[in-house]
Image: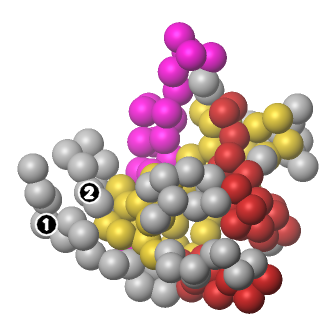
Amino acid sequence: MTLPGDGEICGVDETLARGITSMHLYNGEITEKLFSGKEVSVNLLSKLSLADSVAHFKRDLPRPEQNLIYWGHALLNVGNLLASAAEYKIQNKAFDGKIGVVYRPTPSNSGHAQIEPKISTGFARKLTNEVKGRKDIFPDDPGAVWT
């Protein structure tokens, strides 16, 4: 089923929210798993507010049977993502620099979008370090410590 807006390319001024789970952590450290892989799911905050996105993450991300718990969220600007890709391409000739965010709403998440295509481990590490460096990581537990 195709929903209105499906397939739209997100603009550079858009802000994304990415749910963080225990799968993205290793010994309390947020790892490149936060952004690595194929079709990384994010929420487009112009389509679904941050509060509603966090509520969605808390409801849909935990999977106790897999020991997967919701930890918090990260924010990322599409323009920063594209600038990071351009910089990474200069440093890594094998990376073609083609990356974007595509709006892919679902019946249960009107803000769903995907970072496409697949993000390599190296580029994911760069993105994760940049998000951490900007302090754009927000634990669900205000007392949580992350590195």
- The region drawn magenta spans 45-67
Where is residue 74? Give x, y as percent: 65, 57
Left or right of 59 on screen, residue 109 = left
Badge 2: residue crowd in 10 Å (few <14, some 14–19, many ≥20): many
Q: Is residue 3 above or below residue 88?
A: above
Is residue 26 visible in the rendered image? The answer is yes
Residue at 63%, 44% in the rendered image: 20
The extreme front residue here reads 94
Q: Amino acid at mark 2?
A: Pro
Q: Secondary structure at mark 1?
A: loop
Residue 67, which numbered label? none
> Dominant secondary structure of the magenta stretch?
helix
Front in this rendered view, residue 90 or 9: 90
User: Which label's residue is closer to the chain start, 1 or 2?
Assistant: 1
Front in this rendered view, residue 23 or 92: 92
Q: Amino acid at mark 1?
A: Pro
Residue under pointer 1 = 4
Residue under pointer 2 = 105
Front in this rendered view, residue 94 or 135: 94
Could you say which quadrant of the image residue 97 lies in?
bottom right
The extreme left residue here reads 1
Left or right of 136 on screen, residue 50 = left
Residue at 78%, 47% in the rendered image: 31
Is residue 80 visible in the rendered image? The answer is no
Where is residue 44? Give x, y as percent: 42, 65
Do callouts 1 and 2 mark residues in contact (Cβ within 8 Å)? yes
